[in-house]
Amino acid sequence: MFYLIKCTEDKSLCTVEDFEIVCDPDQPSPVLDDNVNFFYGKEKYEGIVVGMSEDANLLKEKAKKFQRKRKASGSPIQMGMKAQKRSLPSNNLQSRNHSLIDQQ
């Protein structure tokens, strides 16, 4: 069984096999949205299971869709430090010569 895991440290997606997930042998296999510890390379990480399948290629396609969705979002959370601040319009309207205009 292969698992697609979203790493909590950097929000990256990793595909790992079941033997790379750290769990108690008495517990059932992880399911979607479970928090798990896993090994990727020689390092241990923590993450959330976002997909699982017997076919690793299917999970790789799912990972591509996740990444496309993240890029297309454009929300300040996804944009991180690149988010631009927008100035809100003031209630005080000004004319071209910067004198206040009275609203009625």
Image (tube, rainbow, N blue to C red):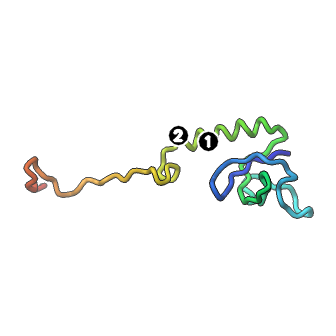
Q: As rendered, which of 82 and 86 lies closer to the eye? A: 82
Identified by mark 1, the residue type is: Gln
Identified by mark 2, the residue type is: Ala
Q: Residues within 10 Å of mark 1 (few under 14, many from 20)?
A: few
Describe residue 35's horizontal placement relative to residue 27 as left or right: left
The spot of residue 2 in percent (x, y) is 82, 45
The residue labelled by disc 2 is 72
The spot of residue 26 in percent (x, y) is 92, 64
Q: As rendered, which of 16 and 43 lies closer to the eye? A: 43
The spot of residue 6 in percent (x, y) is 69, 52
Question: Which mark sits nearer the N-terminus, 1 or 2?
Answer: 1
Describe residue 63's horizontal placement relative to residue 39 as left or right: left
Image quadrant where one finds the N terminus: top right
Image quadrant where one finds the C terminus: bottom left
The spot of residue 40 in percent (x, y) is 77, 52
Q: Is residue 66 above or below residue 44?
A: above
Describe residue 73's horizontal placement relative to residue 35 as left or right: left
The residue labelled by disc 1 is 67
